[in-house]
Amino acid sequence: MFFYKSFNFLRSAVILFILIFGILVQPINSQDLYNFNHGGISRQYYLYKPQSLPVGSPLVFVFHGYGSNALNIMSYSDMNSVADTNLFAVCYPQGTYDDYGSQFWNVGYEFHSDEIDDLDFVIELSQYLTSEHHFSRNNIFSTGMSNGGDFSYLLACEASNVFQAIAPVAGTMMEWIYNSCQPNEPLSIFEIHGTDDSITLWEGDLDNAEGWGPYLDIPSIIDFWQDQNECQSFIVDTLENFSQLDGSFIISETYYNCIYDNEVKLYKIINGGHDWPGAYGNMDIHSAEEIWVFLEQNLQVEFIGDVNFDFSIDIQDLLKISDYLLSGNPYYYLYDFDENYSLSGLDIISIIDYILGN
């Protein structure tokens, strides 16, 4: 009984905040909402593409929190303006509704069933978007607030072959995700989290006192990922406290010299709450800008024709392109050596001419 009373109060408070905050943010044209059928369910997402976006641009997924929605996080995250400056695409998927009428991402909260496979939905959506809009398959990233941050950790564990790095804000790892996490490849992690977060507790909740289900404390999560990445070096720094009025400041902790040049980074917001810094709460940073600076360090450099990523175009690439075309795979720009937006034998002829000419 205690859980249901406390949970309903918490849910009401979160939804009330969203409604009030939604009045303050700039509305975004609803015509940008797209449908995507997955598992017999019509799912929705917003897609933002800056003007003159080059072929092969990165794609960043931004996931809303529990009880929120894609439009809200698009507004307060300000990720679109960062995308305009740095030329990447942004996808804001929409969660489904639970029995309480709140939109969510299925990370196994105690009061959610396993019926909604958000993991598969996002993987399929990423495949569709990279094929349809010619985004880079090798530079897909995830961030999100609260429940969206939790979901980013699930993606890191279960879809590291799709996502290059994640940057959760006020997120955590549910105990079951932590215990079962075996990423195909370790990836870079950047967590932004307040020490006084009263919803996603800094100290975790392995006893499930709050009713969400047991989840890890933030230091243990960071330790897990720096161990996964076999990081050899550590540096700590205090960021400049630009805003004296927000009652908080940020300590930066970075693990580096990791495999694949990965990094594991934490912005520890001393006295910070359940916030997206720069939009509300701590105002010393602009979270979307900090997130992109981190994600950009993990970009995989791509050249059309260099499909084995060894920074040269040779017989190995020719063989891979030939196999790709003969297998009837869908269009992907890296295999389109003659750059005519179609895959055919002409691409093989073009790459042979290139190799012979060099």
Image: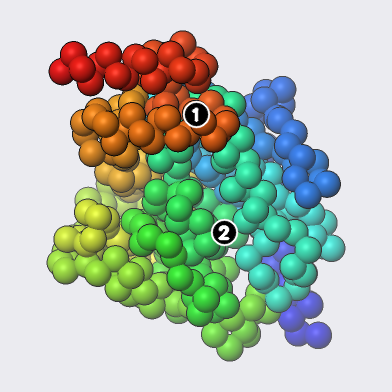
Q: Position of residue 25 (x, y in %)?
A: 60, 34
Residue at disc 1, secondary structure: helix
Asked whether 305 or 320 is in front, the reply is: 320
Q: CA distance from mark 1 to mark 2?
A: 35 Å
Q: Is the C-beta separation of discs 1 and 2 under 8 Å?
A: no
* Residue 151, label in figure: 2
Asked whether 149 or 43 is in front, the reply is: 43
Horizontal arrangement in the rendering, residue 203 relative to residue 26 (left or right): left
- Given the image, on which type of amino acid does mark 1 rest? Leu
Q: Is residue 118 above or below residue 173?
A: above
- At a point 74% along the width and 81% down the height, the residue shown is 3
Quadrant of residue 232 within the rendered picture: bottom left
Where does the C terminus fall, quadrant-wise? Answer: top left
Q: Residues within 10 Å of mark 1 (few under 14, many from 20)?
A: some
Horizontal arrangement in the rendering, residue 110 relative to residue 64 (left or right): right
| Residue receiving disc 1 | 325
